[in-house]
Image: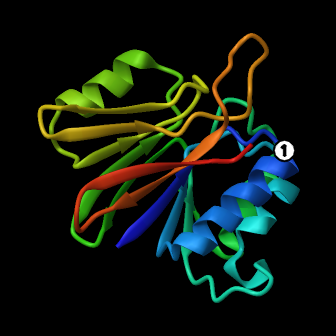
């Protein structure tokens, strides 16, 4: 199973559209958004029925970020996916995922250290991370650019069959 992971899109249509296109091209089966979508209009492109010229067929799983201030966001996600609130535990193709925006580093570290999950997906820092600790893969795809940082925004694609994680630039 292929799982697309994105975070911190912050209403930036360029990066949202690039992530949706990358996920459609990769043929992902599920999309995980680790928060900071911000407004409902920024989540609607993730609706697989809205992807032009594609046979996209994924389910969106989203968690709340610290900049997701509009309560209507949950309703927008729920129209074609699942809005999990602050935290999600998902089992996708037998792989256990923890999804959390990442505003508390001690919580992120505890999720990884628990070894209860195959993958811990988070955002918040806008810094790309791919590391393995004690059998748990920690993924942060990054986010929209922050002034003073050179890193190109990216999304991640997780292959649960091979445990491969790849990053796709969104710039």
Query: Considering depth in this image, is 29 or 99 the residue closer to the camera?
Result: 29
Picture quadrant of residue 107: top left
15 horizontally vs 58: left or right = right
33 horizontally vs 111: left or right = right
Query: Considering depth in this image, is 67 or 166 the residue closer to the camera?
Result: 166
| Residue at the image position 25 percent from the left and 32 percent from the top | 112
Q: In which quarter of the image is the N terminus?
A: bottom left
| Residue at the image position 22 percent from the left and 63 percent from the top | 162
Q: Position of residue 59 (x, y in %)?
A: 54, 74
Q: Position of residue 23 (x, y in %)?
A: 59, 66
| Residue at the image position 66 percent from the left and 76 percent from the top | 80
> Residue lying furthest top in this view?
148
Label 1: which secondary element: loop
Q: Name the residue under label 1.
A: 11
162 horizontally vs 24: left or right = left
Picture quadrant of residue 22: bottom right
Query: Considering depth in this image, is 21 or 136 the residue closer to the camera?
Result: 21
Query: Considering depth in this image, is 166 or 122 the residue closer to the camera?
Result: 166
Q: In which quarter of the image is the C terminus?
A: top right
Q: Which colour scheme is used?
A: rainbow
Q: Position of residue 27 (x, y in %)?
A: 52, 77
């Amino acid at each position: 199973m292929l799982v697309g992971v994105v975070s911190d899109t912050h209403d930036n249509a360029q990066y949202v559209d690039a992530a949706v296109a990358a996920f459609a091209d990769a043929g992902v089966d599920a999309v995980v958004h680790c928060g900071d979508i911000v407004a409902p209009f920024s989540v609607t492109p993730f609706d697989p029925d809205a992807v032009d010229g594609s046979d996209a067929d994924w389910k969106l799983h989203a968690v709340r970020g610290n900049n997701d201030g509009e309560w209507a966001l949950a309703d927008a996600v729920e129209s074609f996916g699942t809005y999990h609130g602050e935290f999600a535990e998902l089992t996708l193709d037998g792989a256990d995922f923890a999804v959390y925006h990442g505003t508390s580093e001690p919580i992120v570290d505890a999720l990884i250290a628990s070894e209860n999950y195959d993958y811990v997906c988070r955002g918040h820092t806008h810094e790309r991370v791919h590391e393995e600790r004690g059998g748990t893969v920690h993924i942060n795809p990054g986010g929209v650019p922050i002034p003073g940082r050179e890193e190109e925004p990216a999304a991640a694609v997780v292959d649960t069959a091979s445990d491969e994680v790849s990053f796709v630039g969104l710039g």
